Amino acid sequence: MATKKSRLHIPRPTARPGDKPDFSYLELSAAGEVDKPSINARTRDIEFLSSGLVRVLDGEHHAVGSWNPDLDPAKLQVALRWMLLNRHFDKRMWQIQRQGRISFYMEAAGEEAVSIGAAMALRAGDMCFPSYRNQGLYMFRGVKLVDMMCQCLSNTRDMCKGRQLPIMYHSKNGNVFSISGNLATQYPHAVGWAMASAIKGEDHIAASWLGDGSTAEADFHHALTFAAVYQAPVILNVVNNQWAISTFQGTAGGERRPFAARGLGLGIPGIRVDGNDLLAVYAVTLWAADRARRGGGPTLIENVTYRGGAHSTSDDPSKYRPKDEWAAFPLGDPIERLKQHLIVEGHWSEKKHEALEEELKAEVLAAWKEAQQYGTMTEGPFLDPSTMFDDVYAETPHHLESQRRRMREVESGNGDGGTS
């Protein structure tokens, strides 16, 4: 009898350029179908949350089910405004990069509810450790558009003083940690911060975000282990937008079980949520935050969403996925869904929406005009190069002061740049 030979499995996306979009691999629950458990529930009793999909908005744009947070319509209008601002900011910055005025940019198109929904559920004292598509989180926490633009421009008002890649923002006042280009490093940072908060007896928690591809990094697993062992008050978000640059989410392990199930073996509850449903993201984040504050430990949340645009300005998604794939994504556009919900409930209208769009476009344009005054990549004023010696040591050593002095002498024409 012939034996079957083992074969190496290579994950493949369900559709490539020229194919019809195919999201049959997504296991979707109906809105309101997944029950909301007590925050005191044991992980073993709520494993269903990692395989189902928490959804609040149904096909008719009504909020249904036990996860419905019953948010005030005024708050939902504010949420809509933040998401729209995020999108118009992205569009402007993308255009600016194409004009050669910044070197690089990354949009959050299609993922706006992930940042805004979570930001609304967290408290101001909670510490956030974001990834590079959490622009909305910075905006919500008070970072001005001008300051975000200046960081991308690496100009004289750049918060990073020209030392970071564009979109690597930070905000001390907003409790938002610096973005790292080394993927997944923010996860252990978030767990460590949360452990420190618990040691100090505070009720502040930490929250972090990374993409589906980053779950293959060792830092992801290290963070989960520490969070589980020490019951750190932290929310660990996986933003499953289906693509890690050009690599389909199955390559990171999304074919076998949802990313939300990654922590079950360690005793960490996982929740799979409709990342394009702002109400669902808010409700799930609030549940996880309350659990953490009461000593329940970490929660792993998988936000099922879709990266509507390119990975970055250096990427061309038409090379690896159908051009119309976003339009076919079954969970839709988060902005359009919240807009339609407000209209159906009688708290919004197309006319109000159009007026808001124009208002936000003007706000972004005004910020851009102001940001240019502090310099661009091609137009002054420019950063003083000697600032590269700052912020390295608490007290600048002699050899760096000597190098700074020689640099200034060369720039002024009074030196030859020789060494001493």
Image (spheres, rainbow, N blue to C red):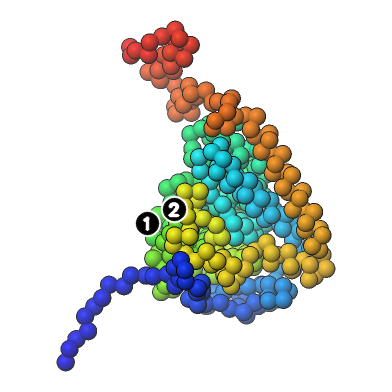
Tell me the residue at 24%/78% (across/down): 6
Horizontal and vertical percent position of residue 69: 71, 68
In this orientation, which residue lies closer to the viewer: 362 or 229?
362
- Mark 1 or 2 closer to N-term? 2
Tell me the residue at 47%/48% (across/down): 314
> Which numbered tag is attached to residue 289?
none
Gap in angstroms between the C-alphas marked 1 and 2: 8 Å
Name the quadrant containing residue 98.
Answer: top right
Q: Residues within 10 Å of mark 1 (few under 14, many from 20)?
A: few
Disc 1 target residue: 218
Q: Tag 2, which secondary structure?
A: loop
In this orientation, which residue lies closer to the viewer: 310 or 232?
310
Question: Amino acid type of disc 1?
Answer: Ala
Name the quadrant containing residue 213.
Answer: bottom left
Question: Amino acid type of disc 2?
Answer: Ala
In this orientation, which residue lies closer to the viewer: 66 or 217?
217
Given the current orientation, which residue lies at the most extreme top position?
414
Q: Quadrant of the N terminus?
A: bottom left
Q: Is residue 181 above or below residue 417?
A: below
Horizontal and vertical percent position of residue 121: 66, 59
Disc 2 target residue: 184
Tell me the residue at 46%/14% (across/down): 411
Res 301 visible: no
Q: Quadrant of the C terminus?
A: top left
Given the current orientation, which residue lies at the most extreme left position?
1
Horizontal and vertical percent position of residue 311: 49, 54
